[in-house]
Image (cartoon, rainbow, N blue to C red):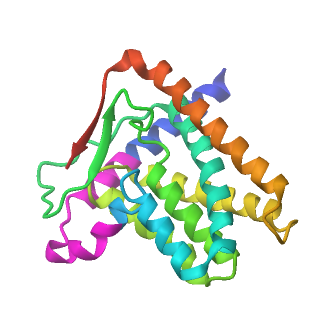
Amino acid sequence: PSHLATMAEMLSKLLDADVRCTRAAQSMSLGWLEVLVYPGSLAFGWEGVGFSLAAAAAAYGFQPLRLVLFSLCYGQLANRALKLFFQRSRPSPPETAKRLFRTIIIQGGHADAAAFPSGDTMAGSATGAALALAGCGNAWWLLGLYVGYGRVYFLAHHILDVLAGYVEGCAVAFLASKVVAKYETFEWRQLAGLLFALVGFAAAMKITKKLQGSSGTSSAKVA
């Protein structure tokens, strides 16, 4: 019991420090330089991920894209499970936080309403890590950090949320690369695995929607 109490106290201190650091970061303004950060806050949400994947396919072709798709499917499954387990609230931004642009923040009873870990950051880091592992350039490892910074700056997440999302995205991309590397062509076993992930993702969507249905209606806040 004493060990559990000590761990709980350490976790509480970590979360308090995260809140303080996040509020300090969000109290700062970039002014018109926000235009450089804004795309990262939208590119891997539900509204922007399709365009991001289309751009990746146009730039690098199908072979790297299949690794991205595997990474995103399994990463989203893990992300939903973690969000449901932790149920961390979105940050309360300081009153001094002023933004020239607005991003979408899902709230209410939606399965993606919980803050930890950041789903957008996970998707960005999974995509970037997958492209890097596919040989498209090591600079892609930075994509998740860019997305994560945008999500913190535009008041959607705590710093710890995006760090966890980044690690999660890189981890699923690494695991997916080990599976995909065994097959040089997109054969039926990879297709079956991708379909299984899609079916599991659809089932997870319904389950989490039912589990969170009693907590309120879903909404998307533009802030």
Q: Is residue 132 left or right of residue 53?
A: right
| Residue sitting nearer the eye, 177 or 96 | 177
Q: Residue furthest front?
A: 188
Left or right: 90 in relation to 52 = left
Quarter occupied by the N terminus: top right
State left or right for residue 61 relative to residue 120.
Answer: right
Q: Residue furthest top?
A: 214
The rendered magenta stretch, by its main secondary structure, is classed as: helix
Residue pictured at 19% horizontal, 72% vertical: 30
Answer above or below: position of 90 versus 18: above
What x and y, as percent, mark residue 115?
41, 41
The quarter holding residue 70 reads bottom right
The vertical placement of 205 against 165, above or below, is: above
Which of these two is toward me, 59 or 162?
A: 59
Q: Position of residue 64 (x, y in %)?
A: 66, 73
Q: Nearer the viewer, residue 55 or 101?
A: 55
Q: How many marks?
A: 0
Q: Residue at x 12, y 48 (%)?
A: 95
Question: Is any part of residue 163 visible from this angle?
Answer: no
| Residue 141 shows up from this direction | yes
Looking at the picture, how far across and down is residue 92, in whole percent?
25, 42
Q: Which stretch is magenta?
A: 18-39
Q: Quadrant of residue 52?
A: bottom left
Is residue 20 shown in magenta?
yes
- The answer to whether 148 is drawn above or below residue 209 in the figure is below
Residue 26 covered by magenta stretch: yes
Residue 140, given in percent of the width and then of the height, sits at 55, 77
